[in-house]
Image (cartoon, grey):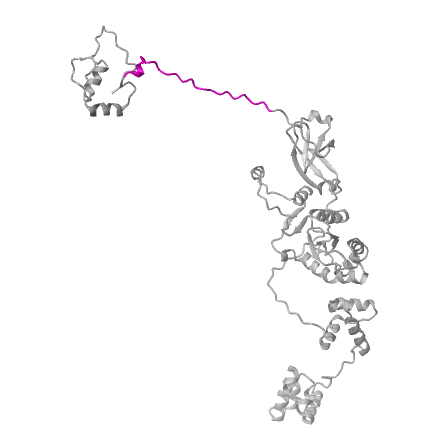
Amino acid sequence: METLTMSRKERARLTIMTGVTDEELTLVQAAQLMGVSYRQGKRIWQRYQADGDAGLVHRLRGKPSARRKPAALREQALALYAQERYADFGPTLMAEQLAKAKLVVDHETLRRWRLAAGQHPVRRRKQRHRQWRERKPSFGAMVQLDGSHHDWFEGRGPRCVLMVMVDDATNRMRARFFEEETTHASYDVLEGWVRKHGLPASLYVDRDSIYRCEGEPSIAQQLAGKQPQTQFGRAMEQLGVELILANSPQAKGRVERMNGTLQDRLVKELRLAGISDMESGNRFLEGKYLRAFHRQFGRAAASAVDVHREVPRNLSEVLSWEAERVVQSDWTVACEGKRYQLDRQHEAMSLVRRKVVVRRLRNGRVQLVHRDKQLKWRALPEGTVRKQMPVKRKARVERVKKQTVPSADHPWRRPGVGAGRSYWNGIRARGELVRAAARLGARDSGRPTLRSGLPASRTPSRGERKPSNKGDILS
């Protein structure tokens, strides 16, 4: 046998036996180096002298194990594994299915059998570094919620979504099938958890539009320092449950890995059970599958304290849709294309122009609430038009300016009166300044003429009445 086929221990012994052959080591020293007794060292030396390098190789190398499974069991397991309905089963899940058929085979043995038969594909996944997060210590400290979109019935039924809730500390799970991932579906699966265990301290979800509002905050919200909320976020705030939004799928890896496990295992269990609709699938989950799943994959929390809180009485009212509306002058409230008439008994509350909350429950009922008090109302027929209150408008008065034409002897019609600088510049350019002054009746005052060429006005004496300057031209 070649040296390359030897183990590390056997290659070390070959080096020691070579030293004994070259008389560099005694047999006693060689036994000490090999860590065996002198008698065992003599046996190894004799086998090396008889068979050479092959004498140092273990005699059972290449021979079948005495504890191997019977060949009939191997053929039977591989024959079942080759069936079409088990084509996508992994070794671990297939080993569990074989155990139900009284065929006990370890999953690693089953994997080696398939590798030897060339039936097991080897898939290598690229690994990425992730930051490990320690589990929460108590049951109910954090529950992760997510919707898993998958062809759960493999074409036998409609495509649907599985809403999954997983406790971070214990792996305890709740799951139900729904047609779509909606606020209604999130409310339903959460209510089932709360009715059974209580209110969790926090809820870990993704950034779907069900849980995160993309709108801009209103002016009132900005003044109050609040961000816009979805209906689900508003309900969690009222219940006192912290809503945590994950920044990546890996952040809520507990529920993401659970989705992968269910897409592998639950799909095959539904196939073996012959289930092809959501109603039967939900009964299968509640009646059999989840209990067995918890026995196999559940774990004890680090702390025995259960931090779930008691269920509030108004849980069904909180898990609803709410909208604020203003009461009109005719005591009606309009919401989502419907109109509601408030009862006369609330007249003392003076609700006109005040806001009320229109609450729509999951069962279709509608409640009108003002300051946590439910109001009585009646629905108006569809197509009812609200009576418009008359609007008083002031009559528009048209003011027409009366145009009056000055008479012929009016002072404004005198030449030069009311004229500007351009008029007098024209008079001066034509050399008619003195004639114009004479026409205006200017009298010589005995003073030098002005720079404009006009005679200066006469200054009245103290006893003389000062003439009126109204209508005169200012230089």
- Viewer-proximal residue among 422 and 332: 422
Q: Is residue 419 above or below residue 256?
A: above
Residue reaching furthest to the right: 102
On the image, the x and y values in percent for residue 169 come to 70, 55
Going by the image, does 245 lie left or right of 179? Answer: left
Q: Which residue is drawn at 71% across and 27% down?
A: 346
Residue reaching furthest to the top: 463
Q: Is residue 14 above or below residue 305?
A: below
On the image, the x and y values in percent for residue 50 come to 69, 94
Residue 404 lies in magenta, yes or no? Answer: yes
Q: What stretch is highlighted in magenta?
A: 391-414
Q: In this view, does 117 lie above or below 155?
A: below
Q: In this view, does 209 lie above or below 122?
A: above
Number of marks present in the image shown: 0
Residue reaching furthest to the front: 408
Q: In which quarter of the image is the C terminus?
A: top left
On the image, the x and y values in percent for residue 448 come to 15, 17
Q: Which residue is drawn at 28% across and 18% down?
A: 417
On the image, the x and y values in percent for residue 366 come to 73, 37
- Viewer-proximal residue among 403 and 87: 403
Q: Residue at x 81, y 60 (%)?
A: 274
Q: Can residue 221 be seen in this view?
A: yes
Q: Is residue 168 visible?
A: no
Q: In which quarter of the image is the N terminus?
A: bottom right
